[in-house]
Amino acid sequence: MKNFIIFFLIVMIICFATPNLFLKDIMAIESFDISTISFFELPEILKNKLGNNLDQSIGGGDSIYDNMQIEVNKLENKDKIKLLLKEENKVIELNFDDYIKGVLIGEMPVDYELEALKAQALVARSYSLYKLENSSSIHENADMCDDINCCQCYKTKEYAFASWDDEEELEKWLKVEEAVNATNNQYIAYEGEVIAAFFHANSAGNTEDVKFVWGGDEIPYLKSVISFENDFDQETKAFNKDDFEKLICEKNNNYDYENDVIKVVNNTPSGRVEAIQFGDVIIKATELRKLLGLKSTNFKFDKRENEIEFTTIGYGHGVGMSQVGANQMALDGKSYEEIIKHYYTDVEILKAEMIAEKNRVVYNGFHKKVKGRIYEINTCF
């Protein structure tokens, strides 16, 4: 019995001591950028840093890194975002979830249904993550800004409470928190990658295919879909002859209101105008919308002797989720997951599998790529 105990202790010492020989070296790895490193590339990178130690086997011929998890030590402020307040020309730092709450207040009426607010929170988080990954250099000292025409509209809790009735403010704030917390760590993905989750106010029946708005290659998850909306914007905007002529001359120097023909060249499948002709110049409807300050490219016009009227339906570029449509779907009993999967074609809702342990987070293969900026990499066996 005594010999057995001694043998057992020796085996235990070998089992615990052997991995530590490798861990000692691994823990000494310097921090490096892994934002674009595939999960399956990490072993090779670690191998280059540690020499051949990582090729040694632990029983059964399995290499040490075959079943490893990636442990990411949280760096300071990793869960925070730097936000540029454009009007004040000031950068503030805040918790990422608090930022999403501020976007929710700024972008969607809190009176909307809870499932619509959840969908908007998920869209805001996904859009933010996409911007952080793909447009991190737009703002020199900030990750995002509060300009709706650049990033997303952001409003503070104090702003919200000042805007809401006193008897409703707590209830509304709790609703915002519930929407954000219910979608915590979730993001919208297409083929495993976070999507450019564009959204707009309302689309008057059909959303728009992204290629007709910004051109370029088709994006498979940003297709035109039916939008169930019982209420949408309708606006008529009039221009006198002289003012209109000056505006169009910015695109066609020779434009003559009285003599030049105005006609729609073609429409997109969703019914919006794609291009319109003024005299001998064709202008994209998206450019005309910006030039005239129209609410959408879904318009008709009525040209008279001294005035021209444009009547638009819908509000926004029309790409991605319609907020009014999302609220209508929620009123019809649809969940936020159903809303998201209706407006974004063939997507899935994923959750970053993060296990909090004291001051660290363990990522179990965040859609095959470890997301983030600069992390210190260790290994767990």
Image: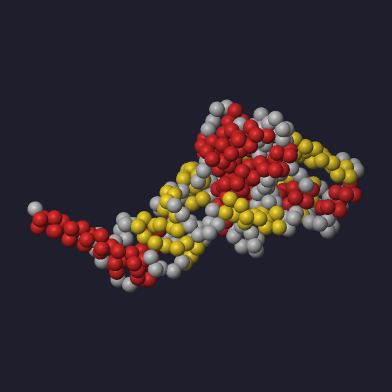
Is the residue 80 above or below the residue 21 in the image? Answer: above
The residue drawn where x is 14% and y is 58% is 6
Q: Is residue 337 left or right of residue 10?
A: right
Number of numbered labels in the structure image: 0
Q: Nearer the viewer, residue 148 or 177?
A: 177
Q: Nearer the viewer, residue 66 or 79?
A: 79
The residue drawn where x is 36% and y is 66% is 26
Q: Position of residue 213 (x, y in %)?
A: 65, 49
Occupied quadrant, residue 379: bottom left
Q: Is residue 144 left or right of residue 258?
A: left
Q: Position of residue 221 (x, y in %)?
A: 53, 46
Q: Position of residue 61 (x, y in %)?
A: 22, 61
Residue 139 visible, this angle: yes
The residue drawn where x is 47% and y is 67% is 32
Is the residue 178 above or below the residue 84 in the image? Answer: above
Which residue ends up furthest to the top in the rendered image?
A: 332
Which residue ends up furthest to the front in the rendered image?
A: 2
The residue drawn where x is 58% and y is 31% is 330
Display colour scheme: secondary structure
- The quadrant of the rendering that contains the C terminus is bottom left
Q: Position of residue 30 (x, y in %)?
A: 44, 69
Residue 313 visible, this angle: no
Q: Is residue 135 left or right of residue 63?
A: right
